[in-house]
Image (cartoon, grey):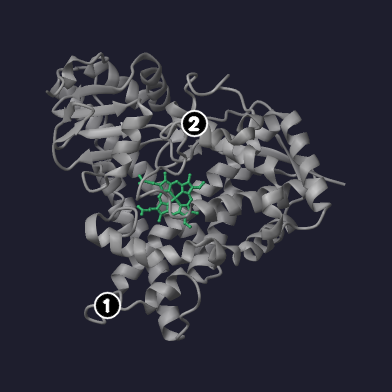
Amino acid sequence: MSRDLMSLPRPDGITALREMSLDRLGFLQRCNQQYEGIVPLQLGDELVCVLNDPGYITEVLKRPRVFIKDKETQALDGLVGKGLVTSEGDFWARQRRLAQPIFRQKNIDAYANVMVEYTQRMLESWQDGAIRDVSTDMMRLALDIVMKTLLGQEVQDVAAQRINNVLEIFQDWLDHNSAVAVAATLAEIGEQQAQISVASSESIDKEYQDAIALFDETVYDIINYRRANGLTGNDLLGLLMQVEDADDGTRMTDQQLRDESATFIMAGHETTANLLSWTWMLLAQNPQVRERLNTELKTVLNGRPPTVADLPQLTYADWVLKESLRLYPPAFEFAREAAEDYELDGYIIPKGTTVIGSQWSMHRNPRYFNEPETFQPERWANDLEKQLPRGVYFPFNDGPRFCIGKNFAMMEALLLLATISQQFQLDLVPNQIIEPRTSIALKPKYGIKVVLKANS
Ligand code: HEM
């Protein structure tokens, strides 16, 4: 016998929608602390189920053919087309299979040198006493690294500008569209105060289309250059250019190459950059942690640049990153749409329902973490990660569609953290507002301004 979903305790739709649009993280966390299991929210015509049970989260992530990407994720296809993040079903499975070999540990180990070299190059422009927005620096560095390692390209300033620009405009466009959707739903359920201006939709759409056109040009330039020079190379783009379909011997079209390249540019730099930016903030706020990290770096590296061989010894640095991913997960929630009716622990989730799970709220749940709001890398000692129930800590998601770049990202973050920390201490400029923005990734809304102090 199935159980009645709508009999479950929940906030009313209008309150939930308002809270979600004003303070998404706060809403997710309150929802997680007040309600267990499934929280069904009727938002106008739409049913949204927030999952607060780690078992339910795991079950949904395990079944990507039933729980497909939600409409908002699908909207990413304007930017990344039918790439790995946005595609579904057999097409996705094929692309995943093709890309997978590039991310085997042995292959990504070969990228360590580029990661350290590019960091050192960035550090040459850093000066003692200078004030910098570290999130801008981390974005550029992570972009340079992903472009070089996966697409075999040095990034020119113009291209970097276009990529950052398209990301910014895209996020504004998404935020604008969701504000319009919220206003429409509130109006539909009779909320009069929900007037928001939609007059600017046209100009935002135009700005977005223009930015995409420039971004496209940049990506096609890369592909054309590679084709013209016969450079197949040992990177992701080279591999994808060489792959032949087993059935008919065809190769990937330029459109497919464009979509995958755009996907890896987008998925592969902002997330890692945000992880590092939040980590610099947390280290500056917790000097005793920073001290312990520096002691480990001194003991293991004694001032020389890190290599892949050093990584297993950098255990405290690894806990620092795990703890930063717990408190400020760049992927702070996932959303899926039920492609068919599905019975979840006796509750029927109707086809078309949006299902949401949140790293932000699970990672801060006091049931699983002592003093969940404090930054304590030591909590990761004794293999805490393995002891937690599945679905509690999942910064890279879980199931068949978990992040293909997880090892790449963790290796990059460790190498950058070690290389930079050895040369500079980053202190926060006082009295600045640091606040997360919940767009595609959790990023510092106004950046993170730091004062650099060169280590003597
Ligand atoms: C700290 C850094 C990163 C975090 C927190 C992160 C997180 C995630 C998460 C949560 C997903 C699943 C999204 C979903 O299915 O809804 C994902 C997917 C993905 N990530 Fe990452 N990611 C990071 C870095 C990277 C890097 C460095 C790359 C590439 C080099 C990458 C490439 C991808 C791709 C292609 C997918 C789609 C996989 C698929 O659906 O098969 N990510 N990532």
- Measure how far apart labels 2 and 1 are at the Cα level: 42 Å
Amino acid bearing label 1: Ala
Q: Is mark 2 within 8 Å of ligand 1?
A: no
| Residue 41 in the image: above or below residue 393 | above
Q: Are marks 2 and 1 in contact (CB under 8 Å)?
A: no
Please tell me how crowded label 1 is: few (under 14), some (14-19), or many (20+) other residues with Cα within 10 Å: few
159 displayed left or right of 449: left
| Residue to which mark 2 is pinned | 388
In the rendered image, residue 287, in percent from the top left (x then y), is placed at: 74, 30
* Residue 345 picture quarter: top left
Please tell me how crowded label 2 is: few (under 14), some (14-19), or many (20+) other residues with Cα within 10 Å: few
Q: Nearer the viewer, residue 453 or 231?
A: 231
* Residue 237 picture quarter: bottom left
In the rendered image, residue 413, in percent from the top left (x then y), is placed at: 60, 49
Provide the secondary structure element on which disc 1 rests: loop
| Residue 23 in the image: above or below residue 270 | above
- Give the residue at x 27% y 21%: 39
Q: Quadrant of the N terminus?
A: top left
416 displayed left or right of 401: right
- Give the residue at x 35% y 50%: 401
442 displayed left or right of 46: right
Amino acid bearing label 2: Leu
| Residue to which mark 1 is pinned | 246
Provide the secondary structure element on which disc 2 rests: loop
204 displayed left or right of 346: right
Q: How many marks?
A: 2
Q: Nearer the viewer, residue 366 or 170?
A: 366
Q: Nearer the viewer, residue 423 or 195?
A: 423
